[in-house]
Image (cartoon, grey):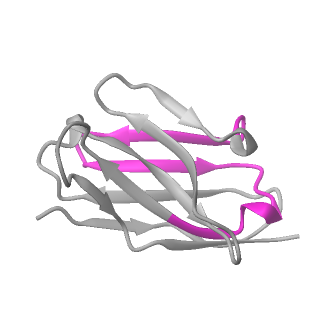
């Protein structure tokens, strides 16, 4: 069974930084596309960033480019999201997601971690 555990959220002032992490029990970590979604009150969940562990390709939503950095550590089965220069609009619950392309049902979500940025 694949389980995900997200952590690292908290309360930070605008301009500050946080580092989120998500650890998985997935045995084939390197086969997954791993990343982060977020959902703010009253808004739909949106993709924030992902990294494809097969080739290292990354993607970021436009609003976080230049501020957020995603990385993964296969030795620890963990994906990280370093968030710098945080803005109030980054306030949301952040969810990690692991997806194994081509494998039916291999799409897993963490429990979410709250990020609150005060202005």
The residues colored magenta run: 65-94
Q: Tell me if 82 is positioned left or right of 103 in this view.
A: right
Which of the 4 image quadrants contains residue 108? bottom left
Which one is nearer the viewer's eye here, 47 or 75?
A: 47
Single out the residue that lies furthest toward the front: 104
Q: Is residue 30 above or below residue 6?
A: above
Single out the residue that lies furthest toward the right: 119
Single out the residue that lies furthest toward the top: 55
Residue at the (17%, 61%) spot, across then down: 2
- Percent from the top left, x then y, of residue 46? 59, 56
Q: Tell me if 64 is positioned left or right of 101 in this view.
A: right
Which of the 4 image quadrants contains residue 119? bottom right
Residue at the (70%, 37%) spot, across then down: 65
* Residue 72 is inside the magenta segment: yes
Residue at the (36%, 67%) spot, across then down: 110
Residue at the (22%, 35%) spot, across then down: 30
- Percent from the top left, x then y, of residue 39? 61, 67
Q: Is residue 75 above or below residue 88?
A: above
Which of the 4 image quadrants contains residue 19? bottom right
Q: How many marks?
A: 0
Which one is nearer the viewer's eye here, 47 or 114?
A: 47
Q: Tell me if 56 is positioned left or right of 117 in this view.
A: left
- Percent from the top left, x then y, of residue 59? 54, 33
Which one is nearer the viewer's eye here, 38 or 29?
A: 38
Q: Is residue 101 above or below residue 8?
A: above
* Residue 95 is inside the magenta segment: no
């Amino acid at each position: 069974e694949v389980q995900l555990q997200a952590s690292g959220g908290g309360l930070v002032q605008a301009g500050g930084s946080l580092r989120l992490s998500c650890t998985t029990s997935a045995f084939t970590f390197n086969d997954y596309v791993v990343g982060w979604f977020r959902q703010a009150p009253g808004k739909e969940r949106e993709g924030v960033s992902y990294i494809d562990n097969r080739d290292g390709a990354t993607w970021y939503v436009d609003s976080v480019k230049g501020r957020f950095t995603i990385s993964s550590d296969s030795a620890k089965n963990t994906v990280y999201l370093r968030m710098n220069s945080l803005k109030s609009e980054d306030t949301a619950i952040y969810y990690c997601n692991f997806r194994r392309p081509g494998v039916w049902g291999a799409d897993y979500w963490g429990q979410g971690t709250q990020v609150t940025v005060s202005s």
